[in-house]
Amino acid sequence: MSARYVRVALDHPLATLFDYAWTLDGEPVRGMLVRVPFGRRHTIGLVHQVSSATEVPIDKIRAVAQACFGCPPLSDAWLRLTEFAADYYQRGLGEVALPALPQALRDAERWQRLFAPQHTYRLSDAGRAALPDALPVRAAALRRLAAAMLDAGTLAADATRAFHPKANAVLAQWATLGWVSLEMSLPLVSSSLMSPAADTDTDTDTDTDAVAIVTTLSASVPDETTPHGSAPHTPPPHTSAPALNAEQAAAVAAIAAARGFAPFLLYGVTGSGKTEVYLRALAQLFERQPDAQALVLVPEINLTPQFEAAFRARFAARSGAHDSEWPEDAIVTLHSALAEGERARNWLAAHAGGARIVLGTRLAVLASMPRLALIVVDEEHEAAYKQQEGLRYSARDLSVYRAKQLDIPVVLGSATPSLESWWHAQQKRYTQIELTRRAVADAVLPAVRLIDTDAEKRAGRATIEGLSAPLVAALKQRVERGEQSLVFLNRRGYAPVLACDACGWVAGCPRCSAYVVLHKPERAMRCHHCGWESRIPRACPDCGNVDLAPFGRGTQRIEEALAGAVPGARVLRIDADSTRRKGSAQALFSDVHAGDVDILVGTQMIAKGHDFQRVTLVGVMNADAALFSHDFRATERLFAQLMQVSGRAGRGGARGEVLIQSGHPRHAIYDALIRHDYPGFANATLAERREARLPPFVFQALLRAEARTLEGALAFLDAGAEALDTIPGAERVTRYDPVPMTIVKVFNVHRAQLLIESASRAALQSTLRAWLPLLRDLKGALRWTVEVDPLDI
């Protein structure tokens, strides 16, 4: 008897499934996308269960309005992954599963466009020979269309109208001349993929025809924000693999030999060739399993271009032992900066199994990959892997769980592993692989030297906007030698504070409990928390004093100072302000790699992952700010940050040097940094954490509340604390008093938090499950969230 009811997950805070009647033609399948009525509107949901009965009264149950038969259902393994994430991070199943999909699949109005047959024009040899010479010189639109065809080779019919308003009529005429041919890709329908037996989590013999259909479709999804649509770009030339040193070879062999779930911590000093280990491990994977898929995560979007270039140069031209070309979508990227059409195209390629390598940021950890066989998490220590809005998940931790679920290896790589991963390795839960020397012949770790800023002041040596005399002299020396330097300051803008020295007025944000930052090139004051912006005041609003002074320094101010301190130097600034436009970061980094920059100034965007071959000097400013933070993780982050930015020096073989300006040069963190002693720092910090009962020796959760007043937020947390105390077994959890957050007010909303922790992860989880229904019954807060394993407290 065919099923008549489906239980659907919706993007809704309630951790429940919603029952609907199935009255459509065709059979419902677990993992299928459907459009259903919800309240007064229709929304997209995910079929999670199929049943022949329901407990909902028949007169109250509503019917599924539409089903997406075109898209293959999401696999059971993927659904189990989202179930785990929803359970562990205390969110509704739909809140996890639906946002993990590209926006195009969450819009029923676009289903018809996405999964309908696609018409494509392909340029013929005759057309390539005739165009554009056969066109009138003044026919600008015709020549634009011809140039697009010559550049792309194929264009989706929908994309051609961006080049000529009557493109279809023109192309039909060109088809009669034999210049182009009209092709139609098959609609995305396959009985093998639509059946429950098509789950390919462990079976690599997926229906190849169905995969081809999905791949054809994914290549035809138009990019809705760019005129070229689905036009492919020219792949980079194939590059041969460099010789491995003994440590790299051992690392590749260990990963290749792994069978089943095998978590590896690849601890390698900066410049030790971790990326080459990833490339070789993937190559060996594809030799063994030609149809396998691999997921490679990077912490930030600006790191994806160089990784994609390296992967395409190694893999795009050939496929292991088969020496056959990979299609364009065999290597795809997934991150939030992609246009909707491009993200949908890449996601579908991964979902179909056509994408062999998926390279992405944290959101890619939830990509549907039916033949996933290896996961790599580069720079695994980075806080960017923790989502800070909505579902507050850790992509690193979900990567490890997903690898365990699929029984496959996972590689966590870093020069400064997180203390959690380091502790797991010390306890033999992870296999630790070490790369202790740099991969380039004769390249060594840079020498680290501290500049005592207090001693410089006592000696009467002048500084230039905080740039000490030794640092300026070293910068000039590198410019004279034709080498590059990097100045690191993790504070953007011109100055963090604009103040009046006559009355003490300080420019603050009217919507936040924070100062506004001076951005001199834009002549603006800007809040980095809510985005509020205003012009620079001409005078103090309190006393009328026109002599307002900027206090502190940001990257814009240092860029300006370097232009005068090092005459003739080509100075470039890279931060969130200079890279706002799409593609701007990649263009700026290309200038650095090309040698068109003498001094690079930037924030943490330049501190990690980049292989600057010509940089021999790194200068660090304002490093002490994190030494006195209230956050117990501050020193761990500072050490990792300094180790990472120091590692940008001397990667090309020339001797590197790192100069760190500090008012506390005798601090233990700097002593370990000088010795490049991450193990010593990590073990000492872990001992302190154990003594203080801090993670990774306890497990934490944070309840945050937002209200119109601080009193309202604290009152909600007080009520939540009382409810917590009524839960049986709550004594196994330690509860702290509610406190305001560091930045109390953001966008006119006041914020406070309450921390709970336990030495038992199971006890914490069971308490949270019992606590959440009680919190939903409380009133007073505008919003509240529970974050498991918080990084910022």
Image (spheres, grey):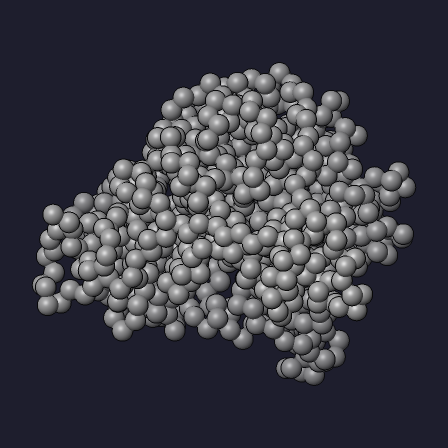
Residue 631 horizontal side relative to residue 172, left or right: left
* Residue 550 spot, x, y in % from top left: 71, 67
Question: Which residue lies at the image location 37% right of the left edge and 49% below the top edge?
Answer: 189
23 or 692: nearer the viewer: 23
Residue 793 horizontal side relative to residue 168, left or right: left
713 or 356: nearer the viewer: 356
Question: Which residue lies at the image location 71% right of the left edge and 57% below the top edge?
Answer: 147
488 or 714: nearer the viewer: 488
Tell me: residue 529, above or below residue 544: above
* Residue 552 spot, x, y in % from top left: 69, 60
Question: Which residue lies at the image location 40% right of the left edge and 61% below the top edge?
Answer: 112
Total marks in image: 0
Tell me: residue 136, above or below residue 372: below
Quadrant location of residue 319?
top right
* Residue 274 spot, x, y in % from top left: 59, 29
Is residue 355 visible in this depiction of the protein?
A: yes
Residue 108 horizontal side relative to residue 597, left or right: left
Is residue 577 visible in this depiction of the protein?
A: no
Tell me: residue 218, above or below residue 537: above
Question: Which residue lies at the image location 79% right of the left edge and 30% below the top edge?
Answer: 654
